[in-house]
Image (cartoon, rainbow, N blue to C red):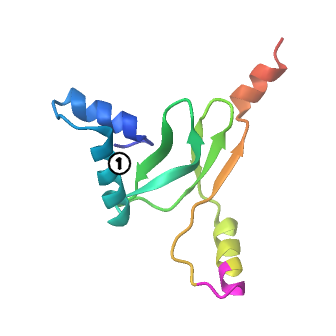
Amino acid sequence: MKDHFHADHLLKLLKDQGYALSLVTIYRNLALLIEAGIIRRAVVQEDTRSGGAWYEHTWGHEHHDHLVCSRCGTKREFVYPAIEVLQEAVAREHGFTLERHHLELVGICPECRGREVAP
């Protein structure tokens, strides 16, 4: 999967390819793939319209964080070096050795904001 996906996406894709699987099997395997470092839970905010948490593959991809629109669910990836520095500083200040992190900024995207202003 190249883009963000949730368990239902994966189940549909695999069923379309002829595999007989259940959603329980998908979730069990997602947990194993997370543990192996191949994927991660990408968006902390649950997407109630689409069926829950979003995932993304991490193998061979640079770290990034997410902007998420609370109205339409649009997800935008970003990298901001100053945030990385601050997170390391916070971890050090509290005696932590940072292994990984996930940052998600939730707001309203320009498209949704534009629709609110339009008559």
Q: Position of residue 62 (x, y in %)?
A: 46, 61
| Image-based side of 29 in relation to 108, left or right | left
- Nearest the viewer among 7 and 83 is 7
Rendered position, 116 above or below 83: above
Residue 27 place in picture, x, y as percent: 35, 48
**Left or right of 23 in this view: 21:** left
Q: Which residue is mark 1?
A: 27
Q: How many marks?
A: 1
Extreme top residue here?
119
Q: Which one is nearer the viewer's eye here, 61 or 70?
A: 70
| Quarter holding residue 46 | top right
Q: Quarter of the image for the N terminus: give it.
A: top left
Q: Residue at x 15, y 30 (%)?
A: 18
Q: Who is closer to the viewer here, 25 or 64?
A: 25
Which residues are drawn in magenta? 91-96
| Magenta-span inclusion, residue 67 | no
Q: Is residue 29 above or below residue 112?
A: below
Q: Residues within 10 Å of mark 1 (few under 14, many from 20)?
A: some
Q: Residue at x 65, y 88 (%)?
A: 95
Residue 107: x and y in percent read: 73, 41
Which picture quadrant has residue 93?
bottom right
The answer to which quarter of the image holds residue 13 is top left
Q: Compared to 60, does 4 lie above or below? A: above
Rendered location of residue 39, percent (x, y): 38, 56
| Three-letter residue code for mark 1 | Tyr
Q: Secondary structure at mark 1?
A: helix
**Which residue is the extreme one toward the bottom?**
95
Side of 119 where 93 appears, left or right: left
Relative to 28, residue 75 above or below: above
